[in-house]
């Protein structure tokens, strides 16, 4: 559990393999104030993780939900990912295109973090190495290193 202190922390959480209850408990235990969803299409076959229900669930816990779809990956680019090499190539393309084209959205994530102190960035994959959110976290951390901690959940 993260103490209720003044540290600024960017949490990294995927919901793969987690029930909605377990996921929400992680947010509560870590005193998260804002959840940033970086899925392009925030629809999930897993109960509770589609945009509207997830937003409602976290709002009941006094956690703000923000969806930033422009930082997501187009679904057609996520087809045929069969190896780590495929993911590596996807993320190289993501860094070269999506991140560079959406600097304003990345700045928005950083501004939300500065204001709210305890922020979680979320997507599906449990392993951040197979999810684009680690590229967002790294991008912000490279610019604003030593201004906040990064904690995977």
Image (cartoon, rainbow, N blue to C red):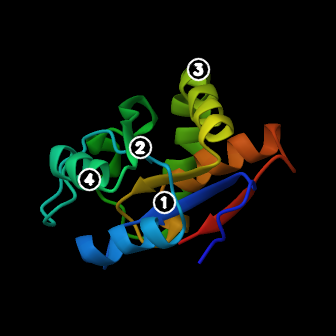
Q: In the rendered view, does 146 fall on the left or right side of 47?
A: right
Corner quadrant of residue 112: top right
Instruction: Give SS at disc 1.
Output: helix
Q: Which residue is mark 4?
A: 60
Q: Is residue 101 above or below residue 81?
A: above
- Please name which of the two marks, 4 or 1, marks the residue nearer to the observer: 4
Q: Which residue is mark 1?
A: 87
Lower sequence index among marks 3 and 1: 1
Instruction: Give SS at disc 3.
Output: helix
Instruction: Give SS at disc 2.
Output: loop
Q: x, y percentage for residue 58? A: 31, 53
Q: Is residue 24 above or below residue 50?
A: below
Whole-Å distance between the Cαs marked 4 and 2? 21 Å
Lower sequence index among marks 2 and 3: 2
Do the residues under discs 3 and 1 have CB atoms within 8 angstroms?
Answer: no
Do the residues under discs 4 and 3 have CB atoms within 8 angstroms?
Answer: no
Q: Which residue is mark 3?
A: 104
Q: Which residue is mark 2?
A: 38
The residue that appears at 12% across and 61% down in the rendered structure is 45
The residue that appears at 32% across and 78% down in the rendered structure is 22
Whole-Å distance between the Cαs marked 1 and 2? 17 Å
Q: x, y percentage for residue 20? A: 24, 70
Q: Report the front residue among 20 and 125.
A: 20
């Amino acid at each position: 559990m993260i103490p209720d202190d003044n540290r600024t922390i960017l949490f990294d959480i995927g919901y793969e393999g987690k029930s909605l209850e377990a996921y929400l408990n992680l947010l509560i235990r870590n005193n998260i104030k804002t959840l940033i969803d970086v899925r392009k299409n925030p629809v999930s076959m897993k109960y509770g993780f589609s945009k509207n229900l997830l937003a409602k669930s976290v709002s009941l816990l006094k956690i703000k939900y923000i969806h930033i779809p422009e930082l997501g990956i187009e679904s057609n680019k996520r087809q045929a990912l069969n190896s780590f090499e495929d993911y590596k190539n996807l993320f190289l393309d993501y860094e070269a295109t999506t991140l560079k084209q959406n600097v304003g959205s990345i700045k928005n994530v950083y501004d939300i973090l500065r204001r709210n102190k305890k922020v979680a960035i979320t997507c599906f994959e449990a392993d951040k190495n197979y999810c684009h959110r680690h590229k967002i976290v790294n991008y912000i951390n490279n610019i604003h290193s030593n201004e906040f901690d990064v904690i995977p959940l």
